[in-house]
Amino acid sequence: MHSFKIRSFIGLLATTFSVAEAAVGLCSKADSVERDVVVIGGGAAGAHAAVWLRDHGKTVALVEKQDTLGGHTAVYHDPATGTPINVGVQAWMEYKDTFDFVTRMGVSTNGSMHFASLTSQYVDFQTGKLVDGYAAPSEDAKFAALQVYLDACEKYEGMLLPGFFNFPEPEQIPEDLLMPFGQFVEKYDIAAAVPQLWQSTVQGVGNFMEVPTMYIMQASPAPMVRALLGKGAAAVPPSGNLHELYERIGDFLGDDVQYSSQAVASTRTEDDGVTVTVQSSVGDNNANNCTIHAKRLLIAIEPTVANMAPFELEESEREVFAKLGYTTVYAGIVRHPALKVGTSYGNTLPAAAPANYTVYPLPAQVGRFDYLDMTSDMFSFTAVGTDADTPASMRALIGQTIAGMVSTGVAAAEPTGETEEVEFTAFADHGMMHSRVSAAELRGGFIQEQLGLQGRRSTWYTGAAFTSAFSTVLWEYNNMLLPDVIKGI
Ligand SMILES: *[C@@H]1O[C@H](CO)[C@@H](O)[C@H](O)[C@H]1NC(C)=O
Ligand SMILES: *[C@@H]1O[C@H](CO)[C@@H](O)[C@H](O)[C@H]1NC(C)=O
Ligand SMILES: *[C@@H]1O[C@H](CO)[C@@H](O)[C@H](O)[C@H]1NC(C)=O
């Protein structure tokens, strides 16, 4: 068992920071195009699906809102050294044969993940004060508890990963999956595992101790825990830059991608395919808009009711998506002269001292600031908002959090005589994440209703709302789903 001082995996996501003059693609060629499948969203799920479809002899159009593919996999290059810093996804968790996809795109998975050795400070971010007497679980206690959690994840793995293909009927769902995670932690006596799960991903779920355990097993799934325990790989390319994969995918797909564009309207039929009108945010007025006719539509964005507006949901479809609750997740890089090089600041409730591992801050909250040791003065951050938070409200909260630590001296301000502003070197808005419903909805057959949407009106769904938000799990989900999507075309 190796001791795995892991940076947060949260951030499993991201948008781009460098907005170069955007390539647009598909619609610059024609006002109207025909394809077998139109894919909406070029994150880990949509980009993989487009390659899979091409590899299976189908024509595709991929519509991506940003000027690059990769979604929550983004990279920032330190200008001083050129070192790539992943913002969002930090590694690919070994899962079945999904590294084959990375290899197929000409990218190697044999790099090593970088681990910084940092001094931990446990700070109440509400007040900026150190939480006196707090002690993290011992490594032994943590790994033992993670193993117990992993055993349970593996017991139910076939029901949850890579999607809900084998999910039980409502009356047969195991109580372990429905109970609030706090109750599960007590039942299995695994409190010592929770700080690591919180740091890795589950802080993104918000009030995760109250959430049905199956959604925790999606947010911190078996492949991630196997990697934490040294029983599975957490892979990166030799360059360390995970976004490299999406650059290769972009090259491969070429003009089948329409960048910097979003669907604005559509018609969806049962027997006669779909039409999607796409509008670009760059270029001369109408030059980069077009209409895509396709036999199938694959939605690979988060299916919030707002995101689905262009797809003119029927009431029965809208009802399903309206039940999903979300938190908003942010990741990025900040600089501030008061943050101490070599330090990791973690948001900790005073009630957690000396050793209560069941209490955590609720959104909106900043999770942590971790010094990036490949830079001279940059810190990664994670932050989680409610579904009402915005990038602006979260930037303000991050500024207040640092100001609080300056006022108490926990972060030692340089005596500049003026209050320094926080500099956002990179800010990734991962948007709505960790979709979930209550145990009552699950008992009422929610998963079956959700799965019942697949294939209706020529429309199919991939992405985190239908599985877990880990790249490799999404790829395996596609491997299982896409044969049905192309049946008969
Ligand atoms: C890593 O992969 C690259 C490219 O696939 C290869 O050239 C190199 O030999 C590999 N290194 C190891 C240690 O396997
Ligand atoms: C094309 O897109 C632009 C925005 O980029 C918009 O102003 C214009 O109305 C669109 N035209 C059509 C025909 O949809
Ligand atoms: C942890 O703190 C919570 C909230 O203060 C409390 O309800 C719970 O009993 C505490 N647990 C332990 C083990 O101290």
Image: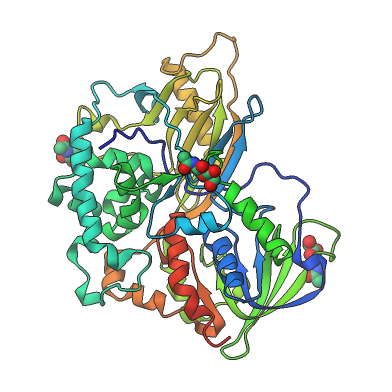
Question: Which residue sits at x=41%, y=80%?
Answer: 452
- Asked whether the viewer can see residue 124, the reply is yes
Q: The N terminus is located in which quarter? A: top left
Measuring from the top left, give residue 327's x and y in whole percent.
44, 52
In this view of the protein, which residue sits in the foreground, 433 or 468? 468
- Residue 480, by quadrant, is bottom left
Q: Is residue 410 left or right of residue 460?
A: left
Can you say whether 26 is above or below 373 in the image? below
> Residue 310 versus residue 138: which sits nearer the camera?
138
Q: Position of residue 260 (x, y in %)?
A: 71, 57
Quarter of the figure that contains the C terminus: bottom right
Instruction: Give the number of marks.
Output: 0
Q: Is residue 104 left or right of residue 121?
A: right
Picture colour scheme: rainbow
Q: Residue at x 45, y 29 (%)?
A: 370
The answer to which of 464 and 356 lies nearer the viewer is 464
Rendered view: 9 above or below 94: above
For the residue pair 55 and 186, the one nearer the viewer reads as 55
Query: Vertically, is 237 above or below 260?
Result: above
- Image-quadrant location for residue 141: top left
Residue found at the very far bottom of the displayed protein = 271
